[in-house]
Amino acid sequence: MNSTELPARSRPFHQVDVFSREAYRGNPLAVVVDAEGLTPERMQQFANWTNLSETTFLLPPTDPRADYRVRIFTGSEEFPFAGHPTLGSAHAWLECGGTPQSDGFVVQECGAGLVRVKRDGGGLAFAAPPLTRCGPVDGAIRSRIAAGLRLAETDVVDASWLVNGPEWIGVLLGSAEQVRAVRPDFAALGSLKIGIIGPGPADGGADFEVRTFIPGGAMVEDPVTGSFNAGAAQWLIGSNRAPREYVAAQGTALGHAGRVHIKADDGDIWVGGQSTTCIRGSVLL
């Protein structure tokens, strides 16, 4: 044990399914509700052990405007911000009796700054953080993306950097059907974080179909990705390619039923969905 780390103790633990009306068909998240005294090394070790796309650790805030602070880990690295961990963490914090300082909003502190979360119908929604990098990708990367998606370059309607923590590249295709038909060459995509989106009808009344591919020990497809949907909404609404309110389906190719609700309102873009606590208990850490 690291000399600066406290002895292991029982801590409240939730496993939350995010971005789906149906339990076990969204994106799972592990949440350690009380992570005080844990070193980053122990957090990373536990996140690797859960074998989920992300694990979060809730801590007292350092900014007096925040209700809690979160650290977000994948199996191999820490993220300054991620979407489904934001909603799942807020859901678990509220379920454990958390009381926001301000009416109507939970304020989360994370590596990307302060993120507001509000109740939205039967779920929660976060205000999309500003993009720290946006704009067209260069021709060489665009060609590499087309090859990695096994598409002709003319199939790519547009491509843009959408960095809001994760270094996403958004790829717009002509239809939801094209998105569902993609069979990526993961080796060709390499270390690129790619999200593809296409308009058109999808099961459940969605307006767009989304898929995201994330490199790690091996590239994987993510079931539902809040950070990419946040960036894609800013890009597509800002360029008048999407209405100010829409629903995106994600996870179809994996047998999931993710639904991400987007709404532009008073200068913010809100990214929301429903969450369900599927496991509740304690963990020894």
Image (cartoon, rainbow, N blue to C red):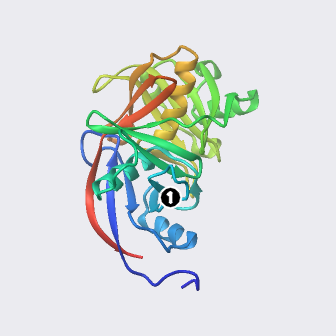
Q: Specify whether 40 is left or right of 95.
A: right
- Looking at the image, which residue is at 57% across and 40% down? 185
Q: Amino acid at mark 1?
A: Pro
| 122 versus 53 height, above or below | above
Where is residue 244 drawn, in percent x and y?
45, 18
Say which of 169 and 102 sits in front.
Answer: 102
Q: Quadrant of the C terminus?
A: bottom left
Secondary structure beneath label 1: loop
Where is residue 38 drawn, in percent x and y?
50, 73
What is the quadrant of residue 167 in the picture?
Answer: top right
Report the number of discs: 1
- Looking at the image, which residue is at 43% across and 58% down? 52
Q: Is residue 181 visible?
A: no
Say which of 217 and 226 sits in front.
Answer: 226
Q: Specify whether 21 is left or right of 107.
A: left
Label 1 environment density (alpha carbons within 10 Å; few <14, some 14–19, many ≥20) = some
Where is residue 133 drawn, in percent x and y?
68, 35
| 80 versus 137 height, above or below | below
- Looking at the image, which residue is at 49% across and 56% down? 69
Say which of 194 and 118 sits in front.
Answer: 118
Q: Quadrant of the N terminus?
A: bottom right
Say which of 114 and 89 sits in front.
Answer: 114
Q: Residue tagged by mark 1?
A: 61
What is the quadrant of residue 153 in the picture?
Answer: top right
| 168 versus 176 height, above or below | below
Q: Specify whether 175 is left or right of 156.
A: left
Where is residue 74 drawn, in percent x and y?
52, 57
Q: Is residue 248 visible?
A: yes
